[in-house]
Amino acid sequence: MKKFFLTSVVYFLFIVVRAATPSLEIYQDPQAQAYYQKKSGFFRLSSPDKIPENLKWVTDPQQPIFADPQAKRGGVLNYFINSTPPVLRRVGPNSNNSFRGIAYDGNDFSLVTLHPNSLKPIPCLAQSWAISEDGLTVYFKLNPRAKFTDGQPVSADDYLYTFYFYQSPWINAPWYNDFYTKEFAGITKYDDHTIAIHLPAKKPDPLNILGSISPTPRQFYKNFGPDYCKVYGERFQPTTGAYTIPDEDFVRGQRVTLRRIPQWWGDNERYTAHRYNVDAIEFKVIREMDKAHQIFLQGECDLFFMGTPKFWYGANSTEPYQAGFIQKARFFNDVPRPPFGLYINSLKPLLSDLNVRIGLQHATDFQRVIDTFYRGDFERLNQFSQGYGEFTNSSIKARKFSPALAKAAFARAGFTEVGSDGILRKPDGTRLSIRLTMDDSERRKFLPTLIESAKLCGLEYRPEVLEHTTMYRKVMEKNHELCFWAWGATGLQPELWQSHHGDNAVEKTVDGLIVPKRQTNNITGTNIPELSEVIDRFRASTDKSEMIQLSFKAQQLIHDDASFIPAFCVPSYRLAYWNWLKWPAHFDVRTSDDPLSTGLFWLEPTEKSRIQTLLKRPQWFQSQLFQRIRIPPTTHIYDQWRTE
C-alpha cells in the first residue's frame, strides 16, 4: 500500500513537472520528417561526439551595451499606420508589405547578429559559435533559455524546420525557395541545442550568412500544407522577439496591437536587456497624415515621424512644442539607402523601348521636388544600390532633368510630332502618355510637380492615387506602368536577385505564353540575360574583390537599362515626441532607421499624467506661471554617425 502511494506521488510529480516545462519534442511534422529522409544529404542527424575537437569557439565578445539600464518597463505606446496590412502571415503573396518590418523583421532574432554600432558579431539565439577550418561550416550552440512568443522553447529541430518550410512550394515565395535551396549546402543537428549550417562554396564572411538564420516554430505549423496562404493569412507566426499579436488584436480597418511577453527570455541577456520596454504598441489605422498629426498634437499619439518639412518646420509654432511638452529629434544613421524612385514596368509595350525609359529619366524632375516640397532637406539618390560602402559604384549618377535630352530620346523612340495639347506623339497618333501610380500618403502632394515638369518635355503623366494596400496589390500583380516605390535596404551587400534577376521577371504558362511573373520583387520586369548571369556569379563568388567588381557591373547594367528613376535619399530620420517618451543619451544606434525596431525608449507615466492634466486646461498656456516655468522649445540633433 505504501509502495503504491509513493509511486503514485512520484508519477503525479512527473506529470506536473512535465506539464509545467514544455518538452523539446513539441511537434514533429511527419511530412517534414519524410522530407528530411528524402534529402538526407542536406538534413543530417549526428551526435555531439562527432563535433570536431579543434574548433575555436567564440562566446560573447563583450561589445558595449547600447540600451539604458535606467529604462522603465510598462505602459502602452500609441502610434498609427495608414492602412491594415493585406495579410499577417510572414511570407507568401502580399506579405512583403511595410508592416512586416514591425511584426517580424524587427521582432525576431537570428543566431548571431552584428552589434548595431561596432558592427562586430554578437550572440543572439546562439550563445557561442565556431567556424570550420575550410570556412564552409559554422557550428552553433543554442541559448537554452530562448523561447518563441507562444512559450515553446527553441531547439535544433526548429532550424531544420526553417529549411523545410522555406524550401516548400506551398509558401508561394520564389525568393525564399531559391535562397534556402541554393545558398546553403545543408544543416546538421548534433543534439537539441547544437547545430551546424553548411555553405556550398566558401564566402568572405560565412558567419554573416549562416548566422542570419532564424528558427521557425514547427508547433505553430501543424496545419502546414498546400493551402498555407489561406489558412495562415491572418495569423501571427510566433517569433523569438518580445511581442506577439493575438488574434483579437488584429482588427482590420481599426487597429493592430503588439503585446509584450510577460517574462521574455531576452530580459536577462546582455544585448536585449532594458529593451522593448512598453507592455504594448497599439497601431491605430489613420489614413490621412494630416489627421494623424492632429491626433498627435492632442496627445493621443506618443510620437510622429516628420519626414515631410510641413510637419517638421510647422511643429515649431504649435503650443505643445512652445510649451516644451513636445520635443523634436533628428538622428543621422549609417545604413544602406532605400531606393525611393519611379519603377518602370518594362514589360508594358510602350515602356519596353529603352529610348522611352531614358526619356522618362530626363523628364522627371526629382531635384525640383527635393528643393521645393522637401525644402532641400533631402538629397538626390543616384542609383538603386546606394549606401553599401565599397560595394556601391559611386561613379554612377542619376540622370539630370533636361527637356532637350528627354525630347531627343523620345524622338529616337518615334515620338516626333507634337499634339495641340503639347504632348508628343508618333505619326500613327500614339500619344506619349503614361499612368503614374502612387499611394495616398503625403508624398502624393508632389505629384503635380512631376506632372508639370514632364509636360515641359512633351510627356503626359496620368496620376493614379490609390490606398496603400490597394496599390501594393496592384504592383505585386505587375499591373502598373510606372509607380513610386521603395524597397527596404539591409545587409552589407546589394541583394539584386529578387529585384532584377530574369527568374523573377517572367514565366511560361501551360499554353506556352510568356507572361509577367506575379508576386515577385522584380516590379520593373527586368529580364537581361547578361545581368542575370552577373547576379548569379556574384552570389556564387568566394572572392571579395571579385564580388565588388561584379556588384559594380550589375549596378552599371541596371543604370543603363533605365528602368528605375532614382528619387531621393534621407541620411537621417526625424520625429517629434511627447516628453513622457524617454530615450537613452545617444538616442538610437548607428544602423537604425526606425527607433521602434531597436526598442530603446520607455514611458514615464507620472510625466504623462502631469502633461495630460495641463492639456485639459488650455488657458494655462497663457498664464504668467507658464511663462516662468516652461521648458524652451528643443530640437535635438544626433549626428555622431553622420556619413554624408
Image (cartoon, rainbow, N blue to C red):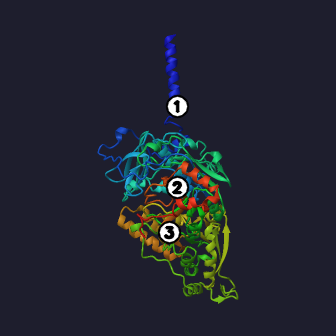
Check the image and report above or below for 377 versus 11.
below
User: Disc 2, disc 1: CB below 8 Å?
Assistant: no
Q: Label 2 is placed on what type of residue? A: Leu
**Sequence order check, earlier mark of 1 and 3:** 1
Q: Quarter-wise, where is residue 567 in the image?
A: bottom right
Check the image and report above or below for 71 versus 11.
below
Q: Is residue 323 visible?
A: yes
Query: What is the C-alpha distance between the residues marked 2 and 1?
Result: 33 Å
Q: Residue furthest top?
A: 1
Towards the viewer: 78 or 112? 78
Going by the image, does 162 lie left or right of 473?
left
Label 1 sits on residue: 20
Label 3 sits on residue: 570
Mark toward the viewer: 1 or 3: 3
Q: Few, some or many C-alpha atoms within 10 Å of disc 1 (few <14, some 14-19, many ≥20)?
A: few
Q: Residue furthest front?
A: 624
Q: Few, some or many C-alpha atoms within 10 Å of disc 3 (few <14, some 14-19, many ≥20)?
A: some
Going by the image, does 380 lie left or right of 256?
left
Q: Secondary structure at mark 1?
A: helix
Q: Label 3 is placed on what type of residue? A: Val
Label 2 sits on residue: 596
Check the image and report above or below for 16 versus 426.
above
Towards the viewer: 541 or 105? 105
Q: Secondary structure at mark 3?
A: loop
**Sequence order check, earlier mark of 3 and 2:** 3
Query: What is the C-alpha distance between the residues marked 3 and 2?
Result: 18 Å
Q: Is residue 84 visible?
A: no
Query: What is the C-alpha distance between the residues marked 1 and 3?
Result: 50 Å
Q: Few, some or many C-alpha atoms within 10 Å of disc 2 (few <14, some 14-19, many ≥20)?
A: some
